[in-house]
Amino acid sequence: MWLSLFTLPLAVALVRAGYYEDTPHKIKESIEGPPRGWFKQGPAPTNHFIELKIALPQPHFPFLEKHLWEVSDPKHDRYGAYLSKEETEELMAPHPETIDVVSEWLSSHGIEGEHLHRSSAQDWVTIRVSVSLAEKMLDTKYHVYTHLHSGESIIRTTSYSLPESLHEHIELIQPTTMFTRLRPFRSTLHWPSDTELTNQSPSTGLLTGPAGNEVDGSCSETITITCLRQLYNAVGYNTSANNGNKIAVTAYLEQYANNQDLQQFFQTENPEAYGSNYTFVSINGGMNNQTFEAAGVEANLDTQFAFGLTYPTPATLYSTGGSPPFIPDLLTQTDTNEPYTKWLDYVLSQKQLPQTISTSYGDDEQTVPYNYAARVCAGFAVLGARGISLLFSSGDGGVGDGNTNSTTQLCYTNTGISKTVFLPQFPASCPYVTAVGGTYQIPEIAIPFSGGGFSDYFRRPSYQHTAVRKYLQNLAPGTYESMYNPNGRAYPDVAAQAQVFSIIYKGQKDLVDGTSCSAPTFAAFVSMLNDARMSAGKPPLGFLNPWLYETGWSGLNDIIVGHNPGCGTEGFNATVGWDPVTGLGTPNFKKLMSLAMAA
């Protein structure tokens, strides 16, 4: 809903306008220069419109975080006593003085009415202004920057300022210094031949899964719904359509799930699901293009496996709009490429949400300004406090770029110093989400591209202290010294298969790799656990990590072989217990269900 500001008397408005015009600006945020790969092309067109998101401080967030830890800790009396939308909004709300001061500042620039939108908790303000007005308000100059490899262009600045009196009332404003290139993780198509696909199907050999159960021999060549249920010990478990449990996946960057492909997939993989559909939710103009030409590999993969594994659990696809980044010669009207805040703005305003949500998008943590990453991460904490399990792919570059060649690797800091460092991924590095790494083969080993490591932004949370310390203590002294932050939030937390997933894409059967396969897979098994709990009158699992590290780990298959190379190194190794390649391991559903029902 778009709200108007309280209309100030003209004389007062003029006084305030003069006050802010005469007040010296002080730098609020700056970076040394654009990240590697970005080049300044020239001044931004002054008549181009941008949507600025203004984050107001959340003084009560520590109390919200305390609630999160309590309701997510299986040893706490409040475990599962999740907060409501209204309760979380009270803890997210800025101080009333902050709302007044920022409103006065915006009004002094003529921003009110249809040019202003407030989030449901009043902690974000969104305005749509011309570049020329943004430059005046922020005492800065915007430029067009182009990425060397992708060719995409965006409008950004490397520094912005605010009147000093506003600094305590505004946490951040973006897009300004953020050069993040949100992208779907690998989702690599294999384009197998008809002969290969035909030869894979009739395999009659049997393999032994980690639970000692039988797995079809064909699963070593192609991963299907049946393979995952066999491998992860969920054969025979049936979910309910009527116990209130729901699952969702997210889609960005004009990724569209093709419904005809989905039905063809259901016919092959889960015939009982044929004819069923999901709830489509459009956010910020997200579309639902059903032409074959518009079908997205990522969206097809997510919907086919997450919904196919959990049918008949009600399913939702969130499609968050946002045109491709700004191309200066097209003079598009808006420059929208910060979808997480738009998605969060929407879901946090909803009273009822799916209990399990999977996302397979991200970028290098260092390309996201710390304040922005921390604020988005805080939004994920709010969802956790409301009982939502958020799962994110851990990334597909191992410890950075996936390259073992020290002369051609591309893992450098953004500080202008040519120092090789590992590149953690965001949002996987956020301590309030569950990051999912990748495995392959049967028996399972770590897949080399499985993203993992340690955050440079977020401290290691207490729930993983014991597990991570054990891993670090067993590393040889000096291993990768100064290339990573041993005190940072460690990820991934868990893992699942990440190679040769059989999907339907544009009417054809194709194979896909990536932790984009792992996240919706693990999310589906979490949703099945929630199904069991909710059918028994228990609350959903909510934020998973405290339970996983405290108890759930014993229901996971420990992966002890493999490593995740990158940045000119062999990366970290998989080993007994937690490791920064496959986390705590892959799911054994029946064991996890027993543990979840006892929590």
Image (cartoon, rainbow, N blue to C red):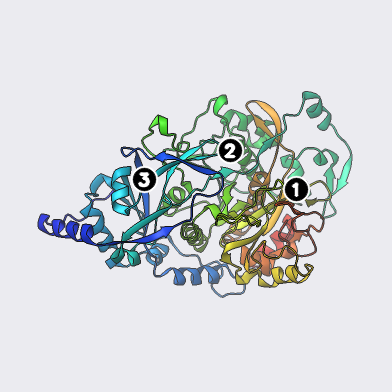
How far across and how far down the image is residue 541, in percent? 59, 61
Q: Mark 3 or mark 1: name the one nearer the start of the chain.
A: 3
Relative depth, front residue between 131 and 595 = 131
Label 1 near label 3: C-beta < 8 Å? Answer: no
> Seen in the image, is 212 located left or right of residue 394?
right
Q: Mark 2 or mark 1: name the one nearer the start of the chain.
A: 2
The residue under the point 12% across, 57% down is 9
Relative depth, front residue between 81 and 188 = 188
How packed mark 1 is, by other alpha carbons closer than 10 Å (few <14, some 14-19, many 20 or more), is: some
Quarter of the picture holding the C terminus: bottom right
Image height of 94 relative to 367, above or below = below
* Amino acid at pointer 2: His
> Seen in the image, is 152 located left or right of residue 497?
left
Residue under pointer 3: 51
> Residue farthest to the right?
205
* Amino acid at pointer 1: Asn
Relative depth, front residue between 434 and 270 = 434
Q: Nearer the viewer, mark 3 or mark 1?
A: 1
Residue under pointer 2: 149
Disc 2 to disc 1, C-alpha distance: 19 Å
Could you tell me which secondary element the residue under label 3 belongs to?
strand
Q: Mark 2 or mark 3: name the one nearer the start of the chain.
A: 3
Residue under pointer 1: 405
Which quarter of the picture shows residue 508? top right
Label 3 near label 2: C-beta < 8 Å? Answer: no
